[in-house]
Image (spheres, rainbow, N blue to C red):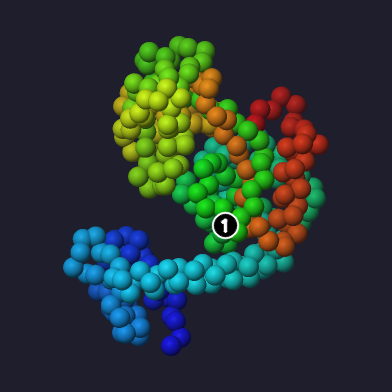
Amino acid sequence: MDLNLHLVRYLVAVVDEGHFGRAAARLHVSGPALSKQVRALERALGAELVDRRTHPVVPTEAGHRFLAEARTALAAADRAVAAVEAHRRAAAGVLRLGFMTAAAGTHTRRVLDLVRRDAPAVSVQLVQLPWPDQATAVRAGRVDASIVRPPIVDTEGLRLELVRHEPRVVALPVGHRLAGRAAVALADLDDDLHVTDDETDERWVRWWACDPRPSGGPVRYGPTVHTMDELLEVVASGAAVAITGSSVVDGFRHPDVVFVPLTDAEPCPISLCTRRDDPSPLVAALRRAVRAVREGAAPLPSGAVG
């Protein structure tokens, strides 16, 4: 049989969400229509692929075997489409660069200035990405490159080039016992609740919370946040503290939040993420610009802090 990848994507959404209703909302289709499409795939394959009696919905044994290979097929199809889309953008002189909140600082702007100098006709489109999509958007071809922060959970097919290392700071409410310090150590924060995020990989949350701690003490998590604005509001309320990169200080302000440098937290590497084998001359120009900025061949404007 010819495998209908559209139906496979429906099945994957159901399994990933564990629920037909949530999967239907994600896919912007009705629940009955989604169920009908999954049934059509099962009839074509001659096997039941999900157990509808369980909560959450889980794959059957046949479903597990099918999905192991089907996900690979979907990824290959996405890469094929991405290659054509990237070629079309390059031919039109368009470069789509993804970035996370606060990651596109002065260094990034300097990189883009060099790209435009190297390729004057280029049109750079900046695309803000949510935390979980900073690398997957590159792999899927939604952007040609992105400025990323660790941890990058899956680097398959990707190429990372360091732009710079960024010190880390802790965001504290103005009334916090440590708010007046010039700097703090991680052990000073062992008794504080830290923000978390239920929409991203746990490894991401733990890396930014510096979990595990040098002291060996457990990190305790409190309120969930999904955006930098939410993070600042939670910190300002005194409900939790948050460890972040120093560039946030330049891009975000809150009258009830102070940022204090951390003395013993691993610096955050900010990197350029591209597809490893991307032949685009615009991506090549972007990589050259990153190397020039990193190696000091293209100094920042006088007085700039990136």
Q: Is residue 255 visible?
A: no
Along the viewing direction, whichever of 266 and 163 lies nearer the viewer? 266
Category of crowding for the residue at label 1, using alpha-carbon neighbours closer than 10 angstroms: few (below 14), some (14–19), many (at least 20): few
Residue 155: image x %, image y %? Answer: 56, 53
Q: Quadrant of the C terminus?
A: top right
Q: Which residue is mark 1?
A: 156
Helix, strand or loop for disc 1: loop
Identify the residue shown where x is 57% and y is 44%: 148
Instruction: Give the vertical position of 47 relative to 239 (above or below).
Output: below
Identify the residue shown where x is 43% and y is 80%: 4
Residue 75: image x %, image y %? Answer: 51, 67
Q: Is residue 79 visible?
A: yes
Q: Quadrant of the N terminus?
A: bottom left
Along the viewing direction, whichever of 200 and 47 lies nearer the viewer? 47
Quarter assignment of residue 69: bottom left
Amino acid, disc 1: Glu
Instruction: Give the vertical position of 235 relative to 43 (above or below).
Output: above
Residue 209: image x %, image y %? Answer: 43, 32
